[in-house]
Image (cartoon, rainbow, N blue to C red):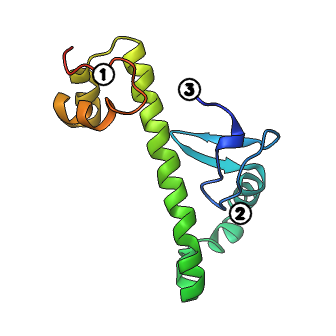
Amino acid sequence: MDFSSANKSCSFCGLQGTAETRFAGGLGAMMCVDCLEFYHHKFSTPELLQTISRPPWDEMSDTEILAKLPLIADTATQVNGFLGEWVQMARERNLSWAEIGQALGVSRQAAWERFAGSKTRKGSATA
């Protein structure tokens, strides 16, 4: 599984990681140190928390909304890649497609069709 921050981006601001970038996160969503510190500060008092109680898009222009779309798409790609890596890890541990499908709430066949052609090494529909 790719654990390098150089291939990740912050799911909050879009910062592209480098080998030196430190991210917090898991399950595919990553947060850079600047965003972590920003939100930690905002959550530190009820008064500051109130300043982020409304969705940020309420104050955004159409141009700003459009500028965010590629960042959101990149985050979705990152999360989907992470899911594929976890499925690969599950297969390397000899977990069956039936078990993986059940965990994902889909059939064995649906799990196999989605992930067997990617990086999974045990791509047979059996098991």
Please state which amino acid type lies under the numbered disc 1: Gly
> Which one is in front in this view, the residue at disc 2 or the one at disc 1?
1
Crowding near the residue tagged with mark 3, few <14, some 14–19, many ≥20 C-alpha atoms within 10 Å? few
Q: Residue at x 21, y 14 (%)?
A: 127
Query: Is 35 displayed left or right of 30 in the figure?
Result: right
Residue 96 falls left or right of residue 83: left
| Sequence order check, earlier mark of 3 and 1 | 3
* 36 left or right, relative to 94: right
Tell which circle, 3 or 2, labels the residue nearer the N-terminal end: 3
Q: Position of residue 81 (x, y in %)?
A: 48, 41
Residue lying farthest to the front in this orientation: 117
Please give the residue where the numbered disc 1 appears in the rendered image. Answer: 123
> What distance separates the C-alpha of mark 2 from that of mark 1?
46 Å
* Secondary element at tag 3: loop
In the drawing, what numbered circle is on residue 1? 3
Q: Earlier in the sequence, mark 2 or mark 1?
A: 2
Residue at 47% x, 54% y: name it.
76
